[in-house]
Amino acid sequence: MTMQIQPILAALRRHRLATLLIALEIALACAVLCNACFLIISRLQLTRVNSGVDESSLASLKLTGYDETSGVDLNARVLSGLRAIPGMQSVSVVNEVPFGEHAGTAGITLDAAGQHKGGVVEFYVGGPGSFQALGLKLISGRAPEPDDYQPITSFVPAEGSVLVTSVLARHLWPDADPLGKEFWCDKFHFRVVGVVAHLARPSGGEGGPDTIEWSVFAPAQPGKNLAGMYLLRADPAQLSRVLRDARASIAKIAPDAVVDLPSSQTIVELRSGYFQQDRAMAGMLVGVIVALLLVTALGIVGLASFWVQQRRRQIGIRRAIGATRGDILRYFQTENFLIVSFGIALGMVLAFGLNVMLMKFYELPHLPLYYLPIGALVLWALGQLAVLGPALRAAAVPPVVATRSV
Amino acid sequence: MFGYYLDLAVRSLKRNKMLTALMVIAIAVGIGASMTTLTVMHLLSGDPLPGKSAHLFYPQVDTNPTNEGSHAEPPDMMDYRSAVDLWSAQRADRQTLIVDSSIKVRVPGGKLPALMETMLSSTSDFFPMFNVPFQYGSAWTSEDDARHARVAVILADLNDKLFAGQDSVGRTLRLKESDVRVVGVLKPWRPLPQFYDVVGGRFSDGDTAGFYTKPEGVFMPFTSGLEINDGNFQQFNCWHPPERPGHLEGASCNWIGLWVDLDSAAKVADYRRFLAGYAEQQKALGRFTHADNTRLRNLMQWLDYNGVVPRDVRLQTWLAFAFLGICLFNTIGLLLAKFLRRSGEIGVRRALGASRAAVFAQCLVEAGVIGLLGGIGGWLLTLAGLSLVRRQPAVYADMAHLDASMFIVTFALAIASSLLAGLLPALRACRVAPGLQLKAL
């Protein structure tokens, strides 16, 4: 292209203020665009957490309001009552499920004296059958055996063989084989017999996204302190019907108990409810981005139209002395490209500044560098699209205009 | 003079409808976005008890005698003994203990299935301290507190559910296995945030929407509430796991909050000394180890410390204002184009004797008219935005409405930002040299 940039720059220098304003608008748009896209992607990534369980086959049923001394009796009635529902593959007693309310959060130590802290972890306590029902994937060691299900007098068994996630194992014993290792929670003592691939804690990443899989599975005998929360497993196609039947049957099986409806849902529903806010936020950010691009485009259209009208006479003269329509079109396109490029250069610096500010207040990593060229491409395209209309109008100015006075 | 400028402004705006529309839309969209988020922010960051909040304080002592955990800040709640000790001393004008628990509620002989409700166990001072409005009956008395009376106050919502909204004073409720008499029914009451229950904000990762839930359905005297619902209490934290989960009276757990009402600086200073003295005394008794770790924050400081405004709401507000900034740059550019295009006209006016100030004022009036039009659009967009907010899943969503003050702010912000946007273009316009422009004509 033999288009000369020199005359364009000379013309822009005569409109320094307006050029600067459009460039600043583009810069600000670039900064907000890159950071908002980054926020959307990070939000959506959060919602993709691997719970480690067979979500589509599982549901939870929570009972409250029963006399807490009657837990043993309640478990027996509910287990046998619910197992009779057609399509039910298994019913087991647990203390919590992923994306539900947390019930077993506690700090652990790596020595009996409690000097060497291991962090705050989540204890999934489950009765016989729950490990298989959850569908946890064992990567080393062994699954719980019948003898591992210990009686429970507090929120966890006093002494027991447990399984940990691979993430937690790496955190606690970075360079050693976790099998056979011990840890303590106050006076309670545990020994690791197996490692599972994934198991996310119920309420997301308390203590940051890195701790979301700091979970322990502790097998225990259901009883007074492990009652009222049931894990139902059924074929995914039948699960909603099975859960509905289960909720309805409680009135007969355990008339003194109240079904806690918000906690008695399929895991898929619990998961969707858990991330509802993140999805709403991502939706809002998308709305902001669309409005932002629209306003920026309107600004470019407005100013370019004004310039075209202002320069009608000059355009006419150029056309009269031999410039083609293409030349005029390209002139405005190149001019827009230069302004937008200037804005983008400034915007990249701003984007980083905004990212640093956001990192101070929110748990966000650094803005990955590849967002910048993508943002630049989007804005260049937007600029070219916005200027096309006014530029075409400029190209349509007939040479005869040069001969008329304004 | 203003009327004349207004007339000129309207004429000028009519001349190029497209450019005018672009500017009005830009301002309207920017104002709509920022006022929607600002209204939510205003709703969530407001003072739940204006005029009263400065006198309400939340005492904290470091009850944890072990070296576990961080002792930079005392725990957000207290164990039974510390809380009851401080309350029994009656060193403030008013004081109330508070603890939440979940309880089964029925009407004996009623047809409705049992409900699970949250019950607040507190003391008689709770109601006058927090200006709680009554619809029927009244609060229980301090004698009821002392003699473990089986009485309860219920919220309007629950009264509607159980008694179809009728005056239920004197009726009986079965809470878990105990029968209690209703002595009062509250009016619909929705403090934002539900300030007296706010704890643990620093552990919530900015996800604090839960602080804006509705108040509890049932209120009972602290003493009797603890008796009838024993076994169903949740700890805030423990330094040793409780012997029997849910039974926390003798446990090494923090689970009770205390609010005190102190209406003068001297009383606050006295209470601070009392709190420090209590902690020292407990250290001497061997119960505390971090005796100097006490706090006495007032209501707004406590809300601030807990960062009650959800992180997402703050982020939305920042975003909306960045967006308004972009819309303003846009408007500045368009106004500049518009004013300078009329250089000829301005030149004539200057040559005929208009001062620079007059030209400047005329340009600003034009910018102001655009702001007013943008404000109307922005107001409509804010209403639309708030109706979108109300459809969000957040617990406070139903409360998002534009009140009178925010309505005024909408227009003030629209006109102020358009005047700001008009400043630079107006300055440029009033510096137009009359001679040059006249020659070009």
Image: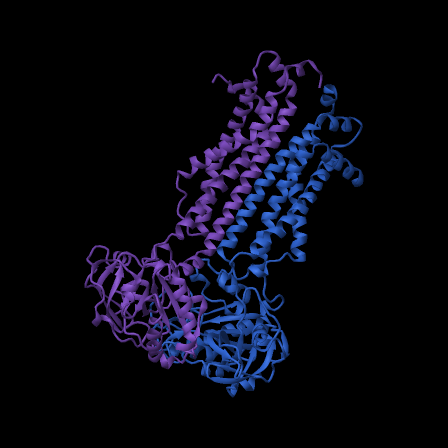
Q: Residue furthest bottom?
A: B147
Foreground: A114 or A231?
Answer: A231
Identify the hue of chain B: blue
> Is B60 displayed left or right of A77 in the figure?
right
Look at the image and name its color scheme.
by chain
Foreground: A254 or A242?
Answer: A242
Q: Is residue A226 visible?
A: no
State which quadrant residue B298 falls in.
bottom right
> Is B232 displayed left or right of B419 in the figure?
left
Foreground: B337 or B14?
Answer: B14
Residue at horizontal 59 percent and vertical 85 percent from the top: B170
Residue B344, horizontal then vertical, whole percent: 73, 25
Residue at horizontal 65 percent and vertical 32 percent from the top: B336
Position of A281 relative to A338 (above/below) = below
Foreground: A298 or B336?
Answer: A298
Position of A69 relative to A93 (above/below) = below
Residue A181, horizontal then vertical, whole percent: 20, 63
Residue B379, horizontal then vertical, whole percent: 65, 49
Q: Quadrant of the N terminus of chain B?
A: top right
Q: Is residue A394 visible?
A: yes
State which quadrant residue A356 falls in.
top left
Q: Residue furthest top?
A: A321
Identify the hue of chain A: purple
Q: Quadrant of the C terminus of chain B?
A: top right
State which quadrant residue B151 falls in.
bottom right
Residue B14, horizontal then vertical, whole percent: 73, 35
Position of A382 relative to A214 (above/below) = above
